[in-house]
Amino acid sequence: MTTPVHLTMDQLLALRDGDRSEPAFATAARHLDSCATCRAELEALHQRTARLRALATMAPAADQFPAIRTRLHWEQSRRRRIISFTGMAAAAALVIGFVGSDLVAPPTLDAEDQIAASISRSQALEQTLHTWGPDDRVMDGRMAMVVIELEDRIADVDARLQDVARLQRKERMPHEASLWQERVGLMNALVDVHLTKANNVDL
Amino acid sequence: MTTKVLTMDAMTLPDADAVIARAKRGDPVALEQVYRAYSTPAYNLARRICRTTEDAEDVLQETFFEVCRSIRNYRGDGSLWGWIRTITSSKALMRLRRNKYRDTDELVDDIAPARSSSPALKMDLENALDRLTDTARAVVWLHDVEGFTHEEIATQMGKTTSFSKSQLARAHARLRVWLGEESRS
Ligand SMILES: [Zn+2]
């Protein structure tokens, strides 16, 4: 007499779940009729499943709802702030525009003083940004786009500053003054964005 | 299965339809009622999939943050618990993928046969469940206890239906041995 080939776990599961997509479903069902061992296995499978379902329900130790409520509230106020930020960014652009037009008229300070003032202002703003540090806190997608755009424009100004450095001093100064002022305006806008973000986070 | 989950809604959230309607309008009281009604089953599901209570609590928070934000998109064509359960399960599986607590069961395979041969060392169900690989444990829980289909599990895991089926068979084969249920010689 040959050793009987019993049902595999896949076949037992197919029988338990009535899964007729299992290729050998019909064969397995026939085997079950004639094999007490496999019937016992199927019964054990049913019992194991019942025991799994009867395992104690685990309850959370902490109430998560206050945190969820805070997050929802934060998200709502951030949405409101983004709307007001759009206006703020437009204002920042206006400031940059004014700075540009100021330059068309002869500046009260001579170019060199003006450049020095702009450089120190730019450094102060950079310091302010640095104080907040490069944090990877969540920033809204639109706000992140504004930051990227501002940073790109600052990089562009820096590139142009390098370009004008090749010019003769007399020619170079007005360009340099203009570029430094543009840089200050952009830095200011960047600080505003980070300030808005910091305020949101503090909520 | 539909009857089972509908009962769950009726049991845990009295006046479910009215509460859902208010929650959809963003009423914070209704949102909290939804949380109170389903946070325990959702946590239990998360905890059965994740290895630590910390991860399960995170999943619970992520789940209900998502529920509160998107309940207005809940169409109501299935039970509310069915909807929340799917969100919970996908967040828990995401956490599992991130943490990869235990990818293979080579270690447990080494230990298990020796242990199971001795009835005195036979494990209880909780311990046996704990010894399964992350994937096998998740599949056996999602399928056999929560009532997800293999198709649903496959979709959530980004795998095939036959993968889900073979993981379930693998889980039961191991549980059977570890629980000392071997009746065949
Ligand atoms: Zn048999």
Image (cartoon, coloured by chain):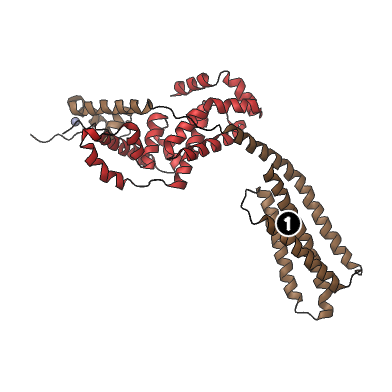
Chain colours: A brown, B red
- Residue A171 screen position, x and y as percent: 83, 78
Chain letter for the residue marked with disc 1 in the picture: A
Seen at 64% across and 36% down, the residue is: A70
On the picture, is A159 further left or further right than B174? right
| Residue A7 visible, this orientation | no
Three-letter amino acid code at disc 1? Leu
Q: Is mark 1 on a helix, strand or loop?
A: helix
Residue reaching furthest to the bottom: A168
On the picture, is A180 further left or further right than B160? right
Say above or below: B106 vs A96. above
In-front residue for pair B140/A51: A51
Neighbour class for label 1 at 10 Å: few (<14), some, many (≥20)?
many
| Residue B143 visible, this orientation | yes
Q: Any atom of ligand 1 within 8 Å of the CB at mark 1? A: no
In-front residue for pair B89/B127: B127
On the picture, is A108 further left or further right than B123? right
The quadrant of the rendering that contains the N terminus of chain B is: top left
In-front residue for pair B164/B176: B176
Residue reaching furthest to the left: A1
Residue that badge 1 annotates: A190
- Residue A176 screen position, x and y as percent: 80, 72
